[in-house]
Image (cartoon, grey):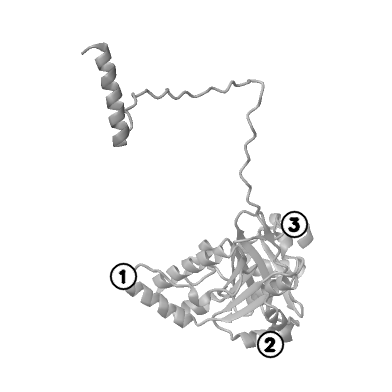
Amino acid sequence: MSKLGFLNFLKKKKKMEKKSGKKPIEPLVAAPAKTHSKVKEDPATPPPPTKAPAVKKIEFLPTRVSNFDSLIDKGGVERGNTLLVAGGCGTGKSTFTMQSLYHGVKNGEKGVYLSFEEPVGKLRRHMKSNFGWELKKYEDNGQLALLKLDPFKIARGVEASVIKKSGDLLVSMESIDLPFMPDRVVVDSLSALSIAFMGNVENYRYYIRHLFEKLDEYKSVNFVISETELDPGIYSRSGIEEFLADGVIVLYNLKSGSKRQRALELLKLRCSDHLKGMIPYSITKTGITIEKRGGAFNEVLAKSRSKRHYSSKTVPSEFT
């Protein structure tokens, strides 16, 4: 084919492509290779500052029980901590915990009292007649909740859950959901709850563990009451409670001859330095009053078999 003939062939081909609507095939061109431009680093220029992770602030709430807070180096109890308040009959466990709850709501906090035994109406009357604590007005304004729980219903629920789940305890806590996020919670008492489990220690221990975990979620200061002997050697029914608790407060009623003397001991408190040893206290018209040590108390303590708990070197001067 001559050169002229080849040119005529190309013209005819283009005309045919236009009529058919097809675009001419373009030659493939290799895409340019991607390059990463390097930023020239100036050694004299410091790197941009990085934000330090936020430090979680730890908050401590005073118990507001007489001068109990002076026994603790932080002046109070860390939020999220649960304290076991153990003692015999008449030592003032309910008084101690309600005193903390009442003075807390008086200072703008919110509190919940969970009773497994005493009716809330009776509790209101006793606190008002004995100490002048008017609880009803704080209930009415939404700062305080007194809740009566049925320990036998809880025990039956735990048993049913264990049977249904073939031994895997998944206890529903719906029955004790709180009406608001509290600053303080009192559970009164584990002794009444343990009786409801009728000797089934395994179910009781599972429930107590779950209860302590639930209390931890509220980030409140929690007091759990445990009934013991007047001069206890163990501080709970099953022995697990004092290990689950972040702190243990023991209220004694020491006997020396025909006399008895009340004494308080902060047995343990995690992540805080605190007084080691017994301090006398009394129950007055204003509630628990922690007193200074004196000759009479020293004499009772010396004669009591509970002297094993006390070391005079650890008691600060303000209590001597």
Where on the picture, by quarter, is residue 144?
bottom right
Q: Which mark is residue 125?
A: 2
Q: Which residue is mark 1?
A: 166
The image quadrant where one finds the N terminus is top left
Q: Which mark is residue 316?
A: 3
Front residue of 45 and 273? 45
- Neighbour class for label 2 at 10 Å: few (<14), some, many (≥20)? some
- Report the mark closest to the observer, 2 or 3: 2
- Report the mark closest to the observer, 2 or 1: 1
User: Given the image, on which type of amino acid does mark 1 rest?
Assistant: Ser
The image quadrant where one finds the C terminus is bottom right
**Secondary element at image label 1:** loop
User: Given the image, on which type of amino acid does mark 3 rest?
Assistant: Pro
Label located before the other in sequence (1 or 3): 1
- Neighbour class for label 3 at 10 Å: few (<14), some, many (≥20)? few
| Residue occupying image coordinates x 79% and y 60% | 318
Label located before the other in sequence (2 or 1): 2
In percent of width and height, residue 148 lies at 56, 82
